[in-house]
Amino acid sequence: MGHKNIPLPERRRLRSKMYKKHNLANILTHWFNVGMWLLLLPTGIAILSSPRLGLSPLWMQEMFRNVFGGTANLIRFHYTVGLLWIFVLVFNILVGFRRYFVPFAATRLLLDQDDIEWLKTKPLQMLGFMKDKELPPQDAYNAGQKLYMYVVIFGTIGIMVSGVVMTFNQVFPPLLKQIAQPVHWVSVFSIVAGLIIHVYMGAVFPEEKEAFFSMFSGKVSAWYARAHHEKWYNEKLREEMAWEDLVRQELARSAEQHAQEQPATAD
Amino acid sequence: MANKTLSRRDFLKVGGAAGGAMLLGSFVAPPIAQAARRLGSLDANGDGYIPTMCEMCVWRCGVLAKVEGGRIVKLEGNPEHPHSRGRLCARGQSGLMNTYDPDRVLKPLVRVGQRGEGKFRTASWDEALDIVADNMLKIKQNYGPEAMVFSSTHNLSQVQFENLLNGFGSPNYGTQRSLCFNAMVTAFSLTYGVEEPARNYDEVEFILLVGRNLTEAISTSETAELVEAISRGAKLVYLDPRYTKTAAKASEWIPIRPGTDAAFLLAMIHVIVSEELADCEFVKKYVLGCDDIVEAMQPYTPQWAETITGVPASTIDRIAREFAAAKHKALAHPGWRTSNFINSFQTERAIATLNALSGNVLTPGGCLAAESPEAASIGLGKPPQPPYPRISALRLDGVPWKYPLVPLKLGVFQELRDAILSGQPYQAHGWLVARQNPVLSLPDRARTLQAISKLDFLVTVDIIMNDTSWYSDVVLPEASYLERYDPLHIVDRKIYLRQPVVEPQGEARSALWIYKQLGERLGLGDFFQYEDEEDYIRQQLAPLNLDFNELRIKGYLDPGVAQEEREIVFNTPSGKIEVYSETLGKAGFSPWPTWEDPVYPRPGEFYLLTGKVAQHTQFGTQNNQLLHKYQDEPRLWLHPEPAASLGLKDWDVVEVTSQVGSVKVPVKITQAIRPDCVYLTPGYGHASKGLRTAYQVGANASDLHVTYTDPISGGQALSQTFVTIKKA
Amino acid sequence: MKRKNHYAFVIDVARCIDCRACQVACSVENHVPMENTRIWVQDLGVQGEFPNLQHIFVPYNCMHCEHPPCTEVCVSGATYKDKDTGLVLVDQDACIGCGYCVDACPYNVRYLDKKRGVVDKCNACAQRLEVGLEPACVATCIGGSRLFGDLNDPVSKASVALQNARNIVRLDYEANGHDTDPNIYYINLPNMEQLNMPELFQPLVSQSGALPRAPKYTLSEQGWKHVAVPLLAAGIGASFLVQAIYFTKQLIEGEKEFEE
């Protein structure tokens, strides 16, 4: 069923019909995360002063050190924000573990056959091949997003653990602190590598504009869902149909009841 | 009872007291800090510098103690003090660790177990002092005052310790002197009438050090002056069987055979006098015996000396000429610890003679002064005291009835120990040891312990549980040198002060306080007529009309006593430098410096040499953690040649055996020692478990040392012990 | 660019008597833990055959190099070369004690302070310099072997000593693209012609070989530099590329999806 050949009235209907994709907890956590990353990433890069790495330009190092009043204060800021970030994230996950995290992990994170097919096709399409091949239908998150989700989850764990090791430097042995540093930045930059696409897709790419606004409203249009996350859309439809069936049954039952009661009163 | 567990009630009491003290402390600074703030040495936070005086050795450098909030954080050499000139040696720098030693004795201790078991209970000062006084009085009553032995080592409070012993009426006084410098002091007293002449390196061109290891046996200012002189280009000839760090700085190291220094020096004198190289004018004017000296020195040719010392005659001849050519800018150093051989006294006499011949005494630019730096009398006061009781008993150390020429104040410590053991001429019953560790420092430790076992009562005054305290019946905790006053000290006509810079740890008290308390309990209160330590010093300053507070602020005072211009008169019977000494002749000894053949080891035996390392002072600093940190592992030095024949590798543990004892110690195989000698740094091998840092580190040389006494000076001959070595 | 000060140690080897007052003074002044030291007196051992012997002592501590390999590996810049004084310092508040710099120092002068979990080393007693005092080791040096001063000042003790020196040796590490250019100047070495300093200069811990040694880099530091950095650069580059392609495409093709 082609997405482009839908008649206009149906399109309008689909555009105005909204599905809830994100709950409030998700939305808040996401934007909290954005804020923390905005604070942590630049300060973190500014801390990296080793000329052997050459990752951080000198002017940036100096600017941040001057703004924060020295290396120590810059680092203090970085790890204080980092600890707050860790605390909130861990707290959220623990509090919402059964209600949000487990279902989320179970229904939205696992890769299925379609996802693998998608992964085989999409990169090639992006490079301009197999233009005409239809992409397999996708879940609430597409396979690329799912894959990136794994990077984010393991990266975040890596950042947190190594960050804690480096923050509480009195407690941990030097070897651990030596290892913690590459772990920290490898994690950060793995996430950053995906983040560039994530931010671009979310904030700039016109097709995904709905996704961006959904991070505020929590909702996407049926149109968008149908186009990008067909499986999820279908599931939503099924849910809806099941609900309609339920309503119909209910109505039928109440009509029947009404019918039985009617004669009695008529007597 | 030493490891008695605190009951809960005790704990509450302690906690309550501490809490109260803390509460009080937040409003009222403790007395020493309070006084220092009043004087301006400390600021309102209790931070600042307080001038005082070092006691890590006997050189007594000036110290500026940096205090922060009631704690000493750093010691600096006082630039105003002629001994430190802004510098402190490793020991001086480590001094605060002496005060903060975790093994400090902080309360009076009374023994509860067997002697040497190390079981003590704490006691109040009153109780501990009563026990000591009771025992001393009992001994006095039963056996006479002479049955009580007193001993102490070189310190500023010694004058009051001597009051205690003289007032008590005992003639038996043991000091470290006979283990150390008896030969030097006796020889120079007899020759110059000066115990220890001062050295002057300002213009020195030729320095002869006879075993004086100045860069390891550091006297801060003198060591600095020596290095300065060497850097300036002065020639240093160094005699020592061991290549010490002084040898490393010497122009010429002569690894002379132990015990033959005198032969070398006599041959030098022979060359100088027979060739008439001496400063004739000076010699004729001031030296007694210069007419006959050529004849007296006739036998001591360099060729003769070569056979004895192993040093080529040509070398001796050359050195003698170089020494003479430097005239009054030559210095033959008197040495310090000169307790090496029975003939060490003659070595010292030869050194005294060499200096006299060079004319370096009292000559402008001369290198030897006719007085010691501390000799100038400034006229300090002293608390009034009655005359001492007459003492008729013989001295146990044999002075003067056995050793007629040993100065009374020097004594013969090792003989005193032997007399306690033998009970001859009478039995001693008690021993009061102050700031001294005879168990470790006297030769033949086994014998010292036996002597102690014959005593009814042994009491020690010290800051830590040293080996002697370990065997004591009562241990009285003294305040460390940074926590107490001591009587004033004079250097170069100025008065220097040791004053407390922090409050004493625990219940530690100054020696001046302890001796006074003890004296009063012994009925000798008249010998201790001072209120407290400050009063004692005020009485010392009174005749000079000097301000005590100024002294406390500056750490020193200059009473403005000018150096007298006076005719040179030496304090000898003739008033001259007595190279020829009638006093010696009358006592039945050679009036001239002479050669006495020492004993030599048998084949297979080694000379056991002892010496100094720059990180420790004798037997007292090994428990200092900072010094422990930077010391070398104590090992037995051995030349590779005998090591090879004994099949020994570096770090092998060897058993070293002498006539009296045996120790196990790792060996250090080095070219830096004669093949017929071994060397062990003394002061290690502590047996007291109360010294957790020093306990059983290294081996103790006094386990091996055989007791030999020089009949003239009374000095112990420490290098006269011969040992055999085998792999352990 | 000339610095305000060019602090340097000048050590008169002929005057060192290995008394170790400097070491104790340093330990006390800087509260160095009992198991660590910031300053060494290297005993070159008794050389020669009895009785023709020679014994030389070489004090050393941080050389405050002009081009220190230690600061290069410090990730956070906790260890740095001070812009005004030229001293190589450690900002303990910024240091996490990973020890990259400990391995990188060719002179083995850095240590990990276990209790505080940071790296420490000689700071030339910067706290004393501030109040006009000499470093503790220099102030107390009995033989006057240790000197410290500003080489920019021609009359400082260090400058004067260098001008009057019989000979001057530095333990420069010059290999593998490094030139440490150290700021400890050894002067007045006896028998210079017989001495090969770097060969004789055995470190205190004998198993780690002669000093100066090549800077060592830990596996994690190496891995980070040689593997992770290129990989991540590639990854970030690739993702940037992807978004650039899309963006370009979008510009060319227009927002046709949204036309209604």
Image (cartoon, coloured by chain):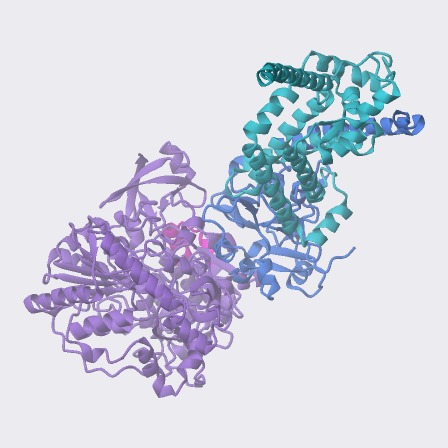
Residue at the farthest right position = C252
Q: Number of marks in the image?
A: 0
Image quadrant in which you'd find residue C70? top right
Residue B562 image offset from top left, x and y in percent:
45, 85
Is residue B376 in view from this perspective? yes
Residue B201 image offset from top left, x and y in percent:
50, 68
Left or right side of C189 for A214: right
At x 10%, y 65%, the residue is B139
Residue A11 image offset from top left, x and y in percent:
84, 22
Image quadrant in which you'd find residue A42? top right
Residue at the farthest left position = B142
Residue at the farthest front position = A267
- Of residue B427 and residue B545, the one placed in the foreground of this image is B545
| Chain B, chosen colour in render | purple
Is residue B578 in view from this perspective? no
Magenta-highlighted stretch: main secondary structure?
Answer: helix
| Chain A, chosen colour in render | cyan
Whether B82 is among the magenta residues is no
| Chain C, chosen colour in render | blue
Left or right side of B524 for A81: right
Whether B303 is among the magenta residues is yes
Residue B622 image offset from top left, x and y in percent:
36, 52
- Of residue B240 and residue C57, the one placed in the foreground of this image is C57
At x 16%, y 72%, the residue is B521
Quadrant where the N terminus of chain C sits is: bottom right
- Of residue B400 and residue C245, the one placed in the foreground of this image is C245
- Of residue B499 and residue A194, the one placed in the foreground of this image is A194
Q: Which residues are magenta?
A: B301-317
Q: Is residue A216 above or below residue B599?
A: above
